[in-house]
Image: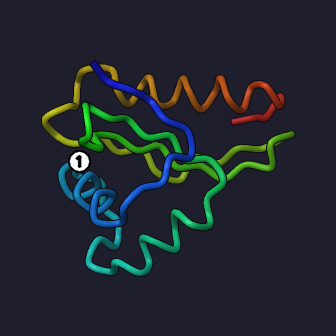
């Protein structure tokens, strides 16, 4: 069963593993940059299979009008199971409380 968490602390090496597995192109060779990318984001939703991070949705939002999706990645073995769609649905649910536009 997949568990979804809002703004749960993430280890940079776990983020890099998901990015590399997913096929998304990000600067995964730059550990510090990935850490800064996530530190500056105010809405991160993560998907977990037990203790394993398997999906990430990262966004920037003013929580009242605009929400910008920066990253959506799901580890290859977990793709095509609706995890990405659920991450987006969670983002819409959370930001919808503020009437934000996507």
In the rendered image, the quadrant that contains the N terminus is top left
Q: Position of residue 63 (x, y in %)?
A: 80, 42
Residue 31 in the image, given as x and y percentages of width and height: 34, 77
- Which color scheme is applied? rainbow
Q: 90 and 102: which one is in front?
A: 90
Q: Which residue is mark 1?
A: 22
Q: Secondary structure at mark 1?
A: helix
Looking at the image, is 18 positioned above or below residue 26? above
Q: Is residue 47 above or below residue 19?
A: above
Q: Is residue 71 left or right of residue 42?
A: left
Residue at horizontal 33 percent and vertical 80 percent from the top: 30
Q: Residue furthest front?
A: 51
Please state, as top left, top right, bottom left or bottom right, where the C terminus lies in the image: top right
From this view, report whether residue 87 is shown above or below residue 66: above
Q: How many marks are shown on the rendered structure?
A: 1
Mark 1 burial class by Cα count in 10 Å: few <14, some 14-19, many 20+: some
Q: Quadrant of residue 67?
A: top right
Q: Residue at x 61, y 59 (%)?
A: 41
Location of residue 37 with respect to 76 vertically, above or below: below
* Image side of residue 17 versus residue 70, left or right: left
Name the one closer to the observer, 64 or 13: 13
**Which residue occupies 73% across, 49% down?**
61
Residue shown at the point (63%, 27%) measured from the top left? 92
Whole-percent x, y for residue 42 in the image: 66, 54
Spot occupied by residue 95 in the image (x, y as percentages of width and height): 72, 32
- Left or right of residue 39, residue 94 in this image: right
Outermost residue, left direction? 77
Between 69 and 58, the one nearer to me in the picture: 58
Q: Residue furthest right?
A: 64
User: In the picture, residue 51 is in which quadrant?
Assistant: top left
């Amino acid at each position: 069963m997949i568990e979804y968490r809002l703004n749960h602390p993430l280890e940079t090496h776990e983020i890099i593993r998901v990015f590399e597995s997913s096929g998304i192109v990000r600067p995964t060779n730059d550990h510090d940059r990935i850490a800064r990318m996530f530190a500056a984001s105010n809405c991160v939703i993560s998907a977990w299979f037990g203790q394993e991070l398997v999906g990430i949705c990262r966004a920037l939002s003013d929580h009242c009008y605009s929400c910008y999706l920066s990253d959506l990645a799901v580890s290859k073995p977990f793709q095509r199971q609706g995890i990405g769609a659920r991450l987006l649905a969670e983002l819409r649910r959370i930001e919808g409380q503020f009437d934000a536009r996507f």
